[in-house]
Image (cartoon, helix red, strand yellow):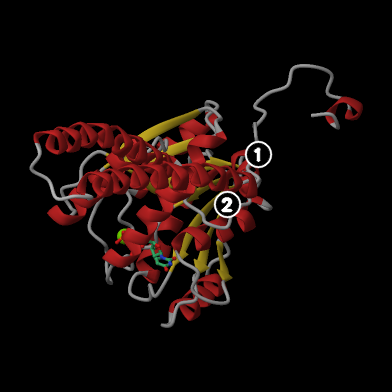
Amino acid sequence: MDRLALVVPCYNEEAVMKISSEALRGVLQDLIGKKKISEDSFVLFVDDGSKDKTWELIEEEHRQHKNIKGLKLAGNVGHQYALTAGLFTAKNCSDVTVSIDADLQDDVSVIEEMIDKFHVGNDIVYGVRNDRSSDSFFKRFTAQSFYKMMAVMGVKTVYNHADFRLMSKRAVEQFSEYRESNLFLRGIMPLIGYQTDCVYYERKERVAGESKYPLKKMLALAFNGISSFSVKPISLITTLGIIIICMCFLAAAYALWSYFTGHVTAGWTSLILSIWFLGGVQLVSIGLIGQYIGKIYIEVKQRPRYNIETFLGETDESEKKYI
Ligand code: UDP
Ligand code: MG
C-alpha cells in the first residue's frame, strides 16, 4: 500500500494548528481504514519561520500523535519555498504527497478522490475550486485577471488551481530537477508532463486566524509567475519599436506635406523625423538585446529539457544507465 504524506506549510498559524491537525489526522485514519493508504502515512507540518507558537504546537502534536511530523525552517522564506522544502523532505519517506494549506480553506474531503485518481495512474492531481463565492470581489477580480494575463503571456497554468495538489513520488522527484531559485509551482507543474487529472471543490473561509497573503505578496507572486515563465514582455518592446518606426513614415508624410505647403518653422521637419525614427530604432535595439537576455535567462535556469514517462525495453542496469 502507498504511504501518503500530507504536506502543510504554516506561517504564524497558532490559531489553526490544533483544528488543522485534528482534521488531517481524521483524513488519514479514514483512508487507512478504507485500506487506500498505508498505516504509516503521516502529516508533515512545515513551520516557515513563524514568530508565534506554531512550532511549539507542532512539537506537541508530534509528541502526542505518531503520524505527525514537523519540519522547522530557519527563517520565513514564503509559502512556495516552505512547501517545496516539505515536498522534498516528504518524498524520501513516502510514495505520494498531497500539499494543503494549514487554514483548511481547501476541502479535505476530496483528498480521497485524489488518492483514487492516483491509483488509476495519475501522477499529479490538481485541486480546482469550482466557486469563488467565499472570496471578496477584489480577490476574485485580481485572481481572474491574473489567470488571464498568464494565458496571454503564454504561461500554462491550471485555471483556479492554487497549491492544493497530489503528487506522486516520481512527480516530486522530477520537480526537484527544476533548479531555478524563483519558484512558481503552479507554472512548473504543467511542465512536468505526466498524466494528470483534476478534482473539484468549494473553497471555504479560513477556520481561524488572518490571511498571510496580503496584496503586496499576491502582486509579487503574480509578477514572479509571469517573469519566471515568459519572455514575452521583451518581445513586446521589439513590437512597439517596429510600430513606432512605421508611424515615423506617416509622420514623415505629414511633415513633408507641411514643409511643401509652406507653413512650418525652419528645422522642425528634420527634428521631428529624427525624434520618431531614433525612438523607434532605440526600442527595436533594446528589444533585440532583451531577446538575448531572455535566452540567457532561460539557459541559466537549467530546466530539464524533457521528462521521461515510460521506457519500454530491457530493464537491466546496463540499459538503465543510458536513460
Ligand atoms: N504561508 C507560509 N509562509 C508565508 C505565508 C503563508 O507558509 O510566508 C502558508 C500559510 O500558513 C498557509 C498557506 O501558506 O498555510 C496559505 O496562506 P494563506 O491562507 O494566508 O493565504 P490565502 O489563502 O489567504 O491566499
Ligand atoms: Mg488561506
Q: Is residue 124 left or right of residue 17?
A: right
Residue 178 visible here: yes
Q: Residues within 10 Å of mark 2 (few under 14, many from 20)?
A: many
Query: In the rendered structure, are the residues bearing label 1 and label 2 in contact, judged by CB atoms less than 8 Å apart?
Result: no
* Quadrant, the N terminus: top right
Report the residue at 38% width, 72% height from top: 13
Task: Kindly identify which residue carries mark 2.
Answer: 41
Q: Is residue 28 left or right of residue 16?
A: right
Residue 107 percent across, percent down from the top left: 32, 48
- What's under tag 2, amino acid-wise? Ser
Residue 78 percent across, percent down from the top left: 46, 66
Decide which of 111, 191 is in the foreground and name it.
191
Q: CA distance from mark 1 to mark 2?
A: 30 Å
Q: Is residue 19 left or right of residue 208?
A: right
- What's under tag 1, amino acid-wise? Pro
Instruction: Relative to 269, say whether 209 is above or below.
Output: below
Quarter of the image where one finds residue 95:
top right
Task: Kindly identify which residue carries mark 1.
Answer: 304
Decide which of 206, 289 is in the foreground and name it.
289
Report the residue at 27% width, 37% height from top: 248
Ligand 2 found in image quarter:
bottom left
Residue 230 visible here: no
